[in-house]
Image (spheres, helix red, strand yellow):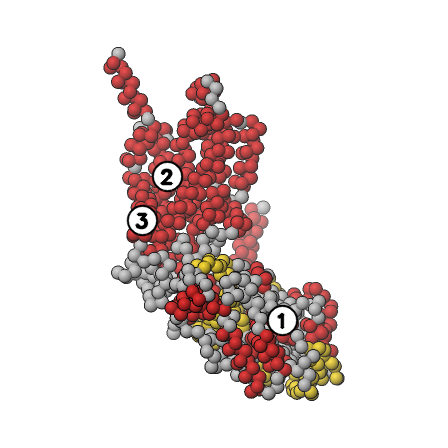
């Protein structure tokens, strides 16, 4: 009898999807590289004050447009500002925008999707048709329109990027809620008289977390790219904020003579977005039961 | 049937090939076609509806004025052959005979009268009408003689008449076209209007009956290329012959052997930082002076203009007629600025917003100023506004803004009256809402003063008062850069930024 219990326990342990996913993720070299780079960027953002050798907006008319050197390892821009320091501080902006925008859209989109999926019927139809309307407008155009209405600053960029990705999360969450809602444990929760919000939040959402996390990781990459895109177009953050897209945009004017002004911010965007995408792909594979060995 | 298909295929491919070739031909200018690139579109071809340099690019070619400025800023004959003052308030102009409009009619005194009547009519709401504020009426003496009557003596009238918006229009053409005149212009200039694709290009064609003889070029194409980098690339590949108002960061592209030529010359464009003097804390002269002391113009020139600018001391660029050469300005002195700010009651500084239009270079200037004012604890937020909105809002009053003024007539009256006279507050130019009785008095009497020395002394006094009041933080005088390929000959650099392509030709 005792022995049997042990067996059950080990079996349960082996079935824990989170541990399983982590094991599978660890075996994925690409995903791990992406994760390490991502962690480095996050550390960079947290300790920007320590890492950056110069203040991000310190102008110096003795060192204009200098190529990379020991003193300024990524060179300087047209105001003599240190590009490396600006990129380090810029990681703060990009990651903040990326994470907050995604958290915002996951929560709003997730709630809409969960409500639609759980109740179905007319409510589902109304919510999802509204999401379809949002989806019909290309998300970057929607973001541009929102920023234009609200005005361009950090908070508004986050709101714009956040709103424009709500429908994606609503759809993902709705789909997984529908697949979960008719299972026994939900039925039993209903049977013992749990309230609807409690059922959605405590029984259903935890069981749909995997696809949401995957979608969110990829969503952060998309949000960072959108924020840079908006700033590149002059709709995002205003000078002198060291937003990478804005740096890229101003560097473009000097591209004939001072390539470092575009290469480094551009490289930073590519590296961060790529690492997020690779990591997100890894997560998806890890959570996908069909790929499990 | 099969045969028909293959014939069809051959015909179609030939058509495709031909259209490809045609595309190429359209892109490359031929020997006597000049392609000019500028960043924004022309607003209108009706001189009474515009007062901006983008529209001038075309208006200067299509129209003629009574009098013109030469490169030395002397007034020379245009449509008028001679002019003199009959009495204090009357000027007489003799018109050239046989000047033809593009529609074939001859220019008569009635056209001149019609033009100026229309220009000063409040219903026309002409943006450049402030230059004619003292014009009362135009009188026809005979077909080739007109008299200008002014309400008060106006010494600057001939200067003001050199402005491209003072061009003579054809009465018949304007009346016939009505509201559509802005797109159907009829002038007497060396080129006539052919077509206009909004925000893309405008085509002008040689007018063979031009009174000074036909131009060397047969066609001018004005292309709108918002991105300087694109314009430079087009210049290199031959798609464009002249790029107007180039940013300094592209100057390095014009090295020897590149086949490109960079024309560089000072213009009458004064770039300034200003304030709405009715708003706190800018109503305090000490604050304005502190800002003046805190700004390092040398850094601005290096960082924003790549060295292609000069420091501006007073309200007028030094080459403008009437600019005082010995004004006491402000030197860069952060300590002094901090002291003044403390004295004004802002020892810890304050926060404000600096408004700027979308121009690349102006944004750089604003960024440098933002960082310099941080040194004296003034926390500046930058706000970029689209050009139209920017002009509209500065006319209502914005705390701090960056703007420039080109004294296109080369005379102090144009460069100071609209900007500092209390009657010109708001959209006419005094966006600082500056009001100083002594300055008003000096500007009014200088307008009416015919004694050159006394007139210059008045402008000098007014300028010094304006500097002491720190109405502006005068920043720089722009150097204008024009990029050309080496086939272009005879381009005449004008400090007024009005470029006449009559003298231009192209070599093979």
Of residue B426 and residue B244, the one placed in the foreground of this image is: B426
Name which quarter of the figure residue B204 lies in. Answer: bottom right
**Residue hosting label 2:** A280
Say yes or no: labels 1 and 3 on the same chain: no
* Residue drawn at (48%, 45%) of the image: A159
* Residue drawn at (39%, 39%) of the image: A217
Numbered badge on residue B80: none
SS of the residue under disc 1: helix
Of tags 2 and 3, the one toward the viewer is 3
Name which quarter of the figure residue B392 lies in. Answer: bottom right
Of tags 1 and 3, the one toward the viewer is 1
Numbered badge on residue B423: 1
Of residue B400 and residue B357, the one placed in the foreground of this image is: B400
* Side (left or right) of A272 relative to B434: left
Measured along the vertical axis of the image, is residue B373 above or below residue A94? below
Q: Quadrant of the C terminus of chain A?
A: top left
* Residue drawn at (36%, 57%) of the image: A56
Q: Please give the chain letter of the residue carrying mark 1.
A: B
* Residue drawn at (34%, 57%) of the image: A55
* Side (left or right) of A239 relative to B158: left
Q: Quadrant of the N terminus of chain A?
A: top left
Residue B189 percent location from the top left of the image = 63, 76
Q: Please give the chain letter of the residue carrying mark 3.
A: A
Q: Please give the chain letter of the residue carrying mark 2.
A: A
Of tags 1 and 2, the one toward the viewer is 1
């Amino acid at each position: 009898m005792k022995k049997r219990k042990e067996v059950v326990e080990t079996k349960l342990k082996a079935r824990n999807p989170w541990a399983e996913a982590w094991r599978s993720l660890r075996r994925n070299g690409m995903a791990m590289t992406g994760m390490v780079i991502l962690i480095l960027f996050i550390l960079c953002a947290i300790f920007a004050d320590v890492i950056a050798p110069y203040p991000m907006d310190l102008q110096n008319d003795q060192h204009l447009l200098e190529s990379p050197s020991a003193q300024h390892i990524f060179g300087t821009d047209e105001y003599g500002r240190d590009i490396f320091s600006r990129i380090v501080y810029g990681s703060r902006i990009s990651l903040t925008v990326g994470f907050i925008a995604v958290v915002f859209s996951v929560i709003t989109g997730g709630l809409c999707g969960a409500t639609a999926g759980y109740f179905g019927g007319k409510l589902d139809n109304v919510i999802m048709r509204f999401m379809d309307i949002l989806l019909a407008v290309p998300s970057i155009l929607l973001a541009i329109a929102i920023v234009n209405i609200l005005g361009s600053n950090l908070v508004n960029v986050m709101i714009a990027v956040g709103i424009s990705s709500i429908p994606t999360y609503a759809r993902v969450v709705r789909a997984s809620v529908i697949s979960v809602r008719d299972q026994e444990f939900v039925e039993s929760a209903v049977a013992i008289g749990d309230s609807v919000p409690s059922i959605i939040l405590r029984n259903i959402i935890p069981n749909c977390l995997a696809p949401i996390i995957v979608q969110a990781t990829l969503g952060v990459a998309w949000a960072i790219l959108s924020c840079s895109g908006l700033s590149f177009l002059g709709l995002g953050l205003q000078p002198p904020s060291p937003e990478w897209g804005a740096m890229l945009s101003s560097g473009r004017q000097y591209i004939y003579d001072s390539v470092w002004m575009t290469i480094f911010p551009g490289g930073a965007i590519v590296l961060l977005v790529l690492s997020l995408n690779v990591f997100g792909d890894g997560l998806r594979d890890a959570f996908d039961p069909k790929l499990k060995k | 049937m099969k045969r028909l298909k293959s014939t069809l295929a051959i015909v179609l491919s030939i058509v495709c090939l031909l259209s490809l070739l045609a595309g190429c031909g359209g892109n490359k200018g031929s020997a006597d076609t000049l392609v000019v690139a500028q960043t924004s579109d022309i607003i209108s071809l009706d001189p009474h509806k515009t007062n901006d340099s983008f529209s001038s690019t075309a208006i200067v070619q299509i129209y003629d004025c009574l009098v013109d400025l030469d490169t030395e800023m002397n007034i020379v004959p245009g449509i008028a052959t001679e002019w003199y003052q009959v009495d204090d308030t009357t000027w007489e102009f003799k018109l050239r005979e046989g000047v033809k409009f593009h529609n074939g009619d001859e220019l008569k005194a009635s056209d001149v009268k019609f033009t100026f009547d229309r220009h000063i009519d409040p219903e026309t709401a002409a943006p450049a009408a402030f230059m004619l504020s003292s014009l009362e009426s135009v009188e026809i003496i005979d077909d080739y003689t007109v008299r200008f009557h002014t309400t008060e003596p106006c010494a600057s009238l001939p200067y003001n008449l050199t402005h491209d918006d003072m061009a003579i229009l054809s009465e018949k053409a304007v009346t016939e076209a009505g509201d559509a005149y802005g797109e159907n212009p009829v002038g007497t200039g060396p080129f006539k209007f052919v077509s206009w694709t909004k925000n893309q290009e405008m085509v002008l064609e040689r007018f063979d009956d031009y009174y000074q003889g036909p131009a060397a070029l047969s066609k001018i194409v004005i292309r709108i290329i918002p991105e300087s980098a694109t314009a430079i690339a087009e210049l290199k590949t031959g798609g464009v012959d002249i790029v107007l108002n180039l940013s300094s960061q592209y100057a390095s592209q014009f090295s020897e052997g590149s086949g490109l030529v960079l024309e560089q010359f000072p213009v009458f464009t004064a770039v300034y930082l200003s304030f709405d003097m009715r708003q706190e804390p800018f109503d305090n002269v000490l604050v304005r002076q502190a800002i003046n002391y805190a700004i390092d113009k040398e850094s601005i020139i290096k960082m924003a203009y790549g060295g292609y600018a000069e420091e501006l001391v007073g309200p007028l660029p030094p080459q403008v007629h009437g600019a005082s050469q010995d004004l006491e300005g402000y030197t860069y002195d952060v300590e002094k600025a901090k002291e003044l700010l403390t004295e004004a009651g802002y020892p810890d500084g304050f926060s404000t917003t600096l408004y700027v239009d979308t121009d690349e270079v102006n944004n750089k200037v604003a960024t440098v100023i933002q960082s310099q004012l941080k040194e004296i604890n003034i926390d500046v937020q930058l706000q970029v506004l689209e050009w139209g909105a920017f002009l509209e809002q500065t006319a209502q009053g914005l705390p701090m803004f960056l703007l420039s003024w080109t004294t296109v007539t080369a005379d102090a009256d144009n460069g100071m009256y609209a900007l500092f006279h209390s009657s010109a507050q708001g959209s006419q130019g005094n966006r600082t809402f500056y009001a100083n009785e002594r300055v008003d008095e000096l500007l009014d009497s200088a307008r009416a003063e015919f004694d050159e020395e006394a007139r210059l002394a008045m402008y000098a006094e007014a300028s010094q008062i304006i500097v002491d009041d720190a109405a502006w933080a005068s920043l720089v005088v722009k150097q204008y850069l024009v990029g050309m390929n080496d086939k272009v000959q005879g381009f005449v650099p004008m400090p007024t930024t009005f470029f006449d392509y009559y003298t231009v030709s192209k070599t093979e």
